[in-house]
Amino acid sequence: MSTTLTRAIVTADKEGRPRLLGRRGPDTPTRHGLKVRNRRETATGYTFLLPWMIGFLGLTLGPMIYSLYLAFTKYNLFTEPEFIGLDNFVRMFTEDPQYIQSVQITLVYVLIGTPIKLAAALAVAMLLNYRDRGSTFFRSSFYAPSLIGASVSVAIVWRAMFSTDGPVDNTLSFFGIEIGGWVGNVALVLPMMILLAVWQFGAPMVIFLAGLKQVPRELYEAAEVDGAGPIRKFRSVTFPMLSSVIFFNLLLELINAFQVFASAYIISNGSGGPAGMTNFYTVYLYKRGFADLQMGYAAAMAWVLVIVVAIIAAILFKTQKSWVHYAGDNR
Amino acid sequence: MSTSTSEIARPEFLEIELDQKPVERRRIKRKTINTIIWFVVLAALTAIVLYPLVWLFIATFKPSSEFGQNPGLIPDNPTIDNYFKVLEGIAGVPLWRFFANSTFIAVMAVIGTLFSSALAAYAFARVQFKGVGILFAAMIGTLLLPFHVVIIPQYIMFQKLELVDTYWPLILPKFLATEAFFVFLIVQFIRNIPRDMDEAARIDGAGHWRTFFSIILPLIKPALITSAIFTFIWTWNDFLGPLLYVNSPEQYPLPVALRLYNDQTSTSDYGATVAVSFLALLPILIFFIVFQRFLVDGVATQGLKG
Amino acid sequence: MFNIRTRRAALAAAAVTASAALVLTGCSGGSEPAATYDPDEEVTLNLAFWGNDVRADLYDQAIAAFNEEYPNITVNSSFLGFPEFWEKRQTEAAGGGLPDVMQFDYSYLRQYSENGLLLDLEPYLGNIIDTEPLSEQILGIGVVNGETTGIPTSTNAWGMFTNPVLLEQAGVEDFAGGSWEDYNDWMAEVTEASGGEVYGGTDWTGRIQNFEIQQRAGGDDLFTDEGEPNFTEEDLAAFWEQGDSIREDGTVISQQELEEIYPVSGFDAAKTASELTWDNFGAGYLGNLGEGYTELGLIAPPVTEEGAKDLYLKPSMLHSIAATTDHPEAAATLVNFLVNSPEAGAIFGTNRGLPASETMLEGAELDPLGEQIRAYEESISDRLGDAPPVPIVGYGTLEEKFRQLGTELGFGTLTVDEAVSQFFSEMDVVLNQ
């Protein structure tokens, strides 16, 4: 057995194909060798994957499937779930104005908040990456707001910033914009929540920074030799080299924004107010599930969200080919 | 890195092309101006970003009664009592105990996450085995479900395993890479490493394990550092997990303990609340400051040359 | 002391005979478990309560006192804030792991009782749990569908706090009582006298309890014994419309200002001179008002109809035992200590509200605030009627919905009619869940 394996590798090497798994292209090694190697790859793959598999099958998958089942039931946590077919979904889309409102504000939050947050994170990461010396302090400062946990302190601080005669109001007044406090203004609560998300842009920023560290300096130097300006350097070096990380941040920030919970819950003390303007999708879901004990309805809401986000994720994965560059994927 | 390379390069440049000195001086001058602009822009942004935290810090010196009554930055009657109050601990449990609990959980979580996520990520990114596509999709899928709907079944599971009121429900999942965020993050970084390196190793007869440990791990240091930082901070701040799985107050980590200062049905001590949340911020800030240094030594370049 | 006894006597005319009967049935029912129960057995109980660190210290002292008497019962206590406490209980209830003894809230009592999560205390009443110091009416509060699943530790009643400092500054006398219109006029007077610096009060139509006492003045509880709503859309619309004028003319603090001072209320922040709420909120208000405040006014809510029994005593909290407990007798012993013993009274004072049990009340040394609450509850005895049925499942949801609709009325984002129809459709969902 072991000799066969060795030969398989050797053969492959002799053919000058460093890609050991000739999945694509016609010039793959012999069928027999491939099979053996495949089997060995599969065994190795699953060994590496073992902890994850145990976690997935043991801790995650069961509860996920159970929640999918609950979506078709009426379940108050204490008595056995009662199967009610599609009733939860019907109620969601036809009889629940709160649900519709929560979808609307969540979409606004996702579509406006995510791009701003990512742009801010990328811009600051690039600024920080410009120079290492002296940027330690700045880097820590920019990350600091993301460190603060979901405690009532966040609500206290953020409300103070946006109250009448608070710093934001005063600054805007200085520029002649008199809109008063944001906290008690139904129309401005959502922008306030978006700004809270943008303020906590530390996580994608750090990931961008880590990604920028992976970009070989030589590429910039080469581009400079070619006389590239900053914009061209960004377009032809930074963006492609960072695209895998941009893709990651984009996908994850979208998912996170759709699931925004802690900040809104804390700011509104769990009420989703004022006037439902912080009643984001997951806040509402949580209220229905845990406060109102309509866990079946909450599960149905959760799975609608899963499907929507899965579609978005699938589209993003499809578009990857045209803009995401993986240095490790031979094309 | 950028400055050090160009600093080394510059003297050579000067020596060789003496006649172009004015151009070079202009370049240096431009560089200085750029640095000044860079500094000013960052300083201004920092001021904006840090202002709320400064406000929070100063608010820790407000007596409780000023919350709601004095929205300004400066306390009317500054006091340090909030800190004394907080340092007393809660119900006979000293404050350091909560810090120690949080630290223990967070450190274990970092070890577990790094270990299990890096392994899984390598499999997804570098090993081509049957079912990789489906499993990868499944992993991404676990990110999509709002976690609130799996709380109950997961609790029942840990209850059946008799692990409630231990730290196991908080730590075990980390060793099993249940946070797909980190697996996916590391996958992205591994996929961005050119294959030349590990393929060279493969030709030398190295198997996946050796490739993983001696080639890939060093190359994804920035991703590992990032994962370590996030795991530590997110675990430190996690509230719901410990709330559900830890029963005795002396086992509470900080976020749960922190809420004990404001119970809306009795008296809420907002002064103590902000003081303790500020104190809770310090260890993770220090953790971040220490660990982010490793992000600076970009390991990527040394491996990617050639 | 004498007065409070007369009050109780007045409240439940049949109390004496009824409790005697209860003690008898209790004895007969309880003789069996008491026989097999070994009081010296080494057991460990889990005790869960909500509260802050002050209350936690008190519980620690109480447990220490309990252990002097029962050294064989080890009590592990755990505590959380109110919302977290219930978040955790809901999960445990679903998973089947509730703590042995719990501090319990009235609004969850029906839900947990009807689902068989709480132990029926009937067998222990009159033997392990002393029923002598608890009036029939108090014991009746914890009865759901014929089963006693909770023993009230303390009671509270709806009342109105006023801020003496603000009133003095404004030069307005404390509210002298009267109708809801009188109250509105009084608030307007305060707001005007202070030059708009502070307000007479908060829009009281945002609280479901004010609706409830108005309905009770007409003889109707909000919900029937069967859990059916006992009011019409017109009733609710008429109620909310009473707030139209005070919202519009700026008599009450605006919703916008309330949002800005969150997490504290207008009354906490010394922005309003009066607040209708439960009478045990005084300590919290004093704490948040801070220096310069040693006392508050506590007076009866406005009168809807003279002579009506619109107010009632509600348990501020109860003690319950999980149905799954392995040591029901030991748990009952602990509950008895926590609700009845003079030691517990001495330790807790009025921290959990005005003690409901006479023996506990005797042990309690009431602070000025406690005395004030006691005096208040005596003063309203004419208006105290029977407590409404134990709140329906989902009452908390409706109460919160009511409050939210009130804020929307304050913002002007909804009309009264829209609010009414939203409330009724929410009620539909809750009642059919």
Image (tube, coloured by chain):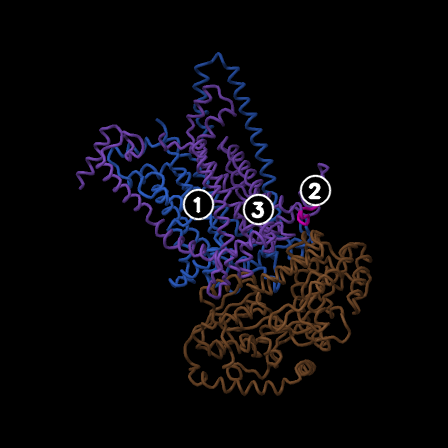
Secondary structure mostly seen in the magenta stretch: loop
Q: Which mark is residue A170?
A: 2
Q: Is residue C224 visible?
A: yes
Q: Do circles 1 and 2 both sit on a common chain?
A: no
- Along the polypeptide, which appears first: circle 2 or circle 3? 3
- Residue bearing mark 1: B181
Mark 2 belongs to chain: A
| Magenta stretch bounds | A179-186
Residue at position x 40%, y 46% in the image: B139
Crowding around mark 1 (Cα neighbors within 10 Å: few <14, some 14 to 19, many 20+) is: some
Please state which of the two labelled residues, at mark 1 or mark 2, is closer to the viewer: 1
Circle 3: residue type: Thr
* Chain (brown): C
> Which chain hosts label 1?
B
In whole angstroms, how far apart are the C-alphas of marks 2 and 3? 29 Å
Chain of the residue where label 3 is placed in the rendered structure:
A
Callouts 2 and 3 on one subunit: yes
Mark 2 vs mark 3: give the one in front: 3
Q: Which chain has been coloured blue in this picture? A: B
- Residue C182 falls in which quadrant of the image? bottom right
- C221 shown above or below C202: below
Q: Is residue B84 above or below residue C378?
A: above
Question: Is A173 part of what is drawn in magenta?
Answer: no
Residue that label 3 marks: A106
